[in-house]
Each structure stands twice: as C-alpha cells, then as structure tokens.
Image (tube, rainbow, N blue to C red):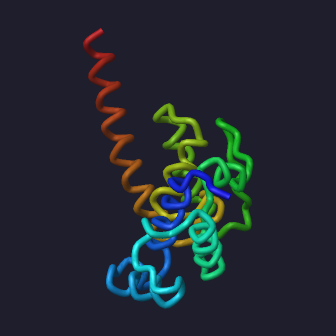
Amino acid sequence: MQGNKQPLYAKIAIARKQLPGMDDDNFWRGWLSDNFWGKRSLRKFEYVELVRLVDLLGRMGAQYTTKAEKRQKRPYVRADFIEIPNSDPNARTKRMICAIWRKLGYALTGLETRVERQTGLLTILGLHDGKQLTAILTDLQKREKAFDKKRAGGESAA
C-alpha cells in the first residue's frame, strides 16, 4: 500500500515536539536506527513504516488532534453567555472578565479561544489558577480603560 507520506511526516513532527528527548536530532536518529532496522532518516522509510512509526509515537503519548477535533471537545459556549456557577471559588473574577470582554464588544467564544491559547485549557470554567485569571483580568482592564478613553474622546468631538 502506497499513500501520501506528507500527512505522516507532519504527525511525526508534531510527536517529536511533544515527546521528551525526541527533538534532539542525535537522539532521534539513534532511536530510529534502533527501532527501524538501522534507518536513520525518514526519507528512507516506506509508507507502511511511517504508519507504524506514527502509531508507535502515539502509543508513547503523542496526540494528533486537529483544530476541528479540539473544537468538538470544547464545552458548548454561546456567543453571548457563559454560566459560571456560584460554587466556583473564582466566580467573581471570571464574571468580571466576561463582563469586560462583552463590554469591549467581543463574543464570549473568543474569550474561550484566548483562554485556550494563554493557558492550554479549553474553557474559562476550567481555569482555577488565580495568577492566570489575574493576568487576563489585568490585561482586559487596561483594554477597557483605553476603550473608555477612546469612546469619551469620540463623544466630546461629536
């Protein structure tokens, strides 16, 4: 069976970044040689061997999720509402973040994207680190001040 090798090369590159030590070229080539009959370069691999390598790296802990798959795993969030339970110890801070985010005119789904990029968590509901919440809140408060200043300047000119 012969197929397109490019997607397999991409998955291998992703796995090398995720697995400890695999990003070191000398270690990587030695590991390949030990596990794949002396082959030290992916270019010498047949399609079936690349499939086997991707599978092996997956069993070692590499995760090959696409952006679409990540979005499907994200809890449903409406563009205009996130329900933050009262039992959450950081509920007040999270609600302040959501309120400022909405005041700035952004959809709350965008907040979820920001939280994921900044913290690696899929939703603000799962964020419990006070320092990370404070960092987001501080940034948004600065944006809010600039927003208010800009709006006040625009109204006085009218």
> In this view of the protein, which residue sits in the foreground, 9 or 13?
9
Q: Is residue 46 above or below residue 39?
A: above
Q: Quadrant of the N terminus?
A: bottom right
> In this view of the protein, which residue sits in the foreground, 10 or 106?
10
> In this view of the protein, which residue sits in the foreground, 129 or 109?
109
Residue shown at 49%/59% (left/top)? 10
Residue 122 appears left or right of 42 = right
Farthest residue toward the top? 158
Residue 36's x, y, as percent? 53, 83
Q: Is residue 148 above or below residue 86?
A: above
Q: Quadrant of residue 109?
A: top right
Residue shown at 32%/25% (left/top)? 152
- Total marks in image: 0
Residue 107's x, y, as percent? 57, 36
Residue 125's x, y, as percent? 65, 60
Q: Is residue 58 above or below residue 133?
A: below
Residue 128 appears left or right of 100 = right
Q: Quadrant of the C terminus?
A: top left
Residue 126 appears left or right of 34 = right
> In this view of the protein, which residue sits in the foreground, 62 or 146?
62
Residue 126's x, y, as percent? 64, 65
Residue shown at 56%/47% (left/top)? 98
Farthest residue toward the bottom? 34
Residue shown at 46%/35% (left/top)? 104
